[in-house]
Amino acid sequence: MALAQAASSTRDGVYTAEQADQGKVIYEKQCASCHQDTLEGKGKNAPLIGDAFLSKWKDQTMADLFMKTNTTMPAASPGSLTPDETARVLAYILQMNKFEPGKKELPTDPDGLAAIQISKP
């Protein structure tokens, strides 16, 4: 019996506030130099906030965003973030996109991430 994908969405409190706070520290060290402190990106560096970001990832799952981030970022050292660090950074990105936190941390396993569809807040 196959599990249904996207059992929840980013609107369902899929990360904790503490996880996002920890992600902010990692973001500032590893991501802000390219994606800016505001997450708005610059030049070829894609925005991680707002309509452009949400439209690009809408209807995909957090597993898609997680794998893209975990394998290609940061640009200077792709794949150097641990799965836990990647989840924390993504929690921060969700927080900055005005998704409300919840009681459970954003998972790091592919099945758990695949069950979360990216939606607009």
Image: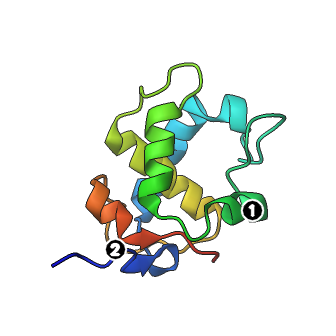
Q: Which residue lies furthest to the top in this view?
A: 76
Q: Looking at the picture, does residue 1 appear above or below residue 21? A: below
Helix, strand or loop at label 2? It is loop
Q: Which residue lies furthest to the left in this view?
A: 1
Image quarter (top left, top right, bottom left or bottom right) of the N terminus: bottom left
Q: Residues within 10 Å of mark 2 (few under 14, many from 20)?
A: few
Helix, strand or loop at label 1? It is helix
- Disc number lying in front (1 or 2): 1
Disc assigned to residue 31: none
Taking the image as drawn, is residue 22 in sight?
Answer: no
Which badge, 1 or 2, is on the more N-terminal residue?
1
Instruction: Identify which amino acid the numbered label 1 is placed on.
Output: Gly
Image location of residue 93, percent across then percent down: 58, 55
Image quarter (top left, top right, bottom left or bottom right) of the C terminus: bottom right
Q: Which of 60 and 19 is in front in this view?
A: 60
Q: Name the residue under label 1.
A: 50
Q: Looking at the picture, does residue 27 appear above or below residue 4? A: above
Image location of residue 70, percent across then percent down: 44, 38
Residue at x 31%, y 52% (from the top left corner): 108
- Left or right of 81, for residue 47: right
Q: Looking at the picture, does residue 17 appear above or below residue 67? A: below
Taking the image as drawn, is residue 56 in sight?
Answer: yes
Disc assigned to residue 103: 2
Q: Nearer the viewer, residue 9 or 96?
A: 9
Residue at x 71%, y 38% (from the top left corner): 35
Instruction: Identify which amino acid the numbered label 2 is placed on.
Output: Lys
